[in-house]
Image: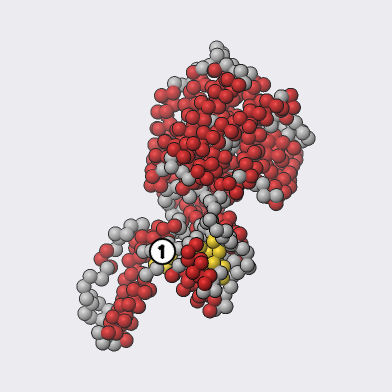
Amino acid sequence: MEQHAQDFLLQDGFLLLGTALVFVLLFRRLGLGATLGYLLAGAVLGPYVLNLIGDPQGKIGIAELGITLLLFIVGLELAPRRLWRMRGEIFGLGLLQVALCGLAVTAVIHLLAGFSLEAALALGLPLGLSSTAQVLPMLRSAGRLHTPFGERSFAILLFQDLSIIPLITIIAAMNRNPGLPAGPPGWQLALTTVLAIAGLIAAGRFLIRPLFRLIGNLGEREMFVFAALFTVIAAAALMQILGLSTALGAFVAGVMLADSPYRHELEADVEPFRSILLGLFFMSVGMMLDLSAIAQRPAFVISMAFALIAVKSTAIFFLGLLFRMEWRNALALGLLLSQGGEFGFVLFAQASQAWLIRPEAASLFGAIVTLSMVTTPFLMMATRRIREMPANKEEREGPQDEEANALVVGYGRFGQTVAQILLAADIKVTLIDTDTQMIDVAGGFGAKVYFGDGTRIDLLRQAGAANAELILFCIDGDQLTENFLHAVHNAFPKAEIHARVFDRGGLLRLKDAPLRSITREVMESAVVVARHALEGLGVSLEDIDRAEDIYRARDKERLSLQLEAGDLRAARDRILTQPIREEGGE
């Protein structure tokens, strides 16, 4: 019996991994993204096409760990202070999106499809949610998760996760099945959620952080993997026991570790498991795509999927405008979140058990959710030209891959000096900037500067970053974030990254970024001015060198203590406020 089960496990694993490999490589090659490849691979293997793998429902239970791990990684990238800063958009934009889209889709189902009001609510409210598992990887791969656009998208998705609790309560309140036990009241679920989150925060501070500190001191590399997976699964299991969102639990655990020194190591440990399990999740969704339901009522499924996309994208577009988004970004947000989400399958099943909808309707609307997810990559590709900001009234040439050794992003006064020294050393350079006036002036002096936003991963790739040895960010350091620089490093691991920052605060903000060097933009010029001033006073070259050495040593020591403490006010006693009379002393 055990051997028989093992044979099935090996056979299923071989088919799942092999088919996923073929489809994902093909769809990546076609520029359609991995998600669509996973979905169609699952549909081909599932019971409605080749029927080579059974029990997609059982597999999706395991594969949902992929969503849990995804939310944990996203939590690791969002420090509590940043999350607090986003609270207005989470509870403002997020709440309005869930309410407006849910009620609008409910009205369409009730008025056009002829469902009762209770059934329309049980179907429409879940359809107002989008696919976290699809949208977040798209934002991360494009390097846009930590842009203002990405943060607004994430704020909506996070509130959607929180809204699972009231949606479960609404469906339970409409229950028509007398044999179904009544669930806990909504206030109890809300209180349980608050207490569970508080418990996770306390556990993160007093248990998990000391655990990772102990593992770090022991130097046991593989134990980080065990501890990381334990943290995620324990947080998710706690939430599951309480009947809450497992993904929300993992997200809170990630946020609690976001400002710990082990954040990047945790992310690296969890990422491979996340990728595999998330791919398995989408394959399971593809296997559950009921092609027979679509075949019986193809016009209904296609028209409802189209109506879902149209209603949600329109509603979110106008919400984006209400929140003062530029219309192209508002359109992109609407299209990106226009699909149904994975939680729809869970809520449809609950509505079916509560006798609010028939099992056939749950299967039919499950197919509508899957079909809407399939359309998202195509919608984003088809509308790219409309959504992209025009460079200028005049046509501006975007960057090209010139097989340069170095990419210099920003060609102002700082970037010009950097680029010219590289050229003097016979290094081939590609120049990128967004200032059209400066591009024209540079062109008059014979310098070829391409127009483009060098803080976009796709544009850097277009400029040849994949083969470059150096990427130098000579733009204002406030435009750079630690997470963006990690995304650049992950996308282009062969390139060394150098950056400039305005002052010590900028350097402190990017202390954990994967930078080969980071330079305060006025530091060296200030040192040179001070040397010239001392020369003018007749101070000997030996004493000038000594003064510079003292300053640099103190500055380095102070900076090291500031980085360690994460506080600009640290080591204030190392600031020179009095003349140093004796050599080497105070």
Q: Is residue 554 left or right of residue 17?
A: left
Q: Residue sitting at 23 percent across and 70 percent down? A: 577
Is residue 465 visible in the rendered image? The answer is yes
70 relative to 170, above or below: below
Q: Residue sitting at 29 percent across and 63 percent down? A: 571
Q: Amino acid at mark 1?
A: Val
Farthest residue in the top direction? 178
Residue 344 percent location from the top left of the image = 58, 30
Q: How is the image coloured?
A: secondary structure
Q: Quadrant of the C terminus?
A: bottom left
Q: Nearer the viewer, residue 326 or 9?
A: 326
Q: Quadrant of residue 280?
A: top right
478 relative to 188, above or below: below
Is residue 35 visible in the rendered image? The answer is no
Q: Quadrant of the N terminus?
A: top right
Q: Nearer the viewer, residue 568 or 431?
A: 431
Q: How many marks?
A: 1
Farthest residue in the front direction? 393
Local secondary structure at mark 1:
strand
Q: Nearer the viewer, residue 249 or 140?
A: 140
Q: Residue sitting at 21 percent across and 73 percent down? A: 578
Q: Is residue 570 left or right of residue 233?
A: left
Q: Nearer the viewer, residue 136 or 234?
A: 136
Residue 168 percent location from the top left of the image = 51, 25
Which residue, given by chain and number where applicable, does mark 1 sit on?
Answer: 501
36 relative to 129, above or below: below
Residue 554 percent location from the top left of the image = 31, 71
Residue 582 percent location from the top left of the image = 23, 80
Q: Residue sitting at 63 percent across and 31 percent down? A: 305
Q: Is residue 417 left or right of residue 531?
A: right
Q: Quadrant of residue 557?
A: bottom left
For disc 1, the neighbor class at 10 Å (few under 14, some 14 to 19, many from 20) is: many
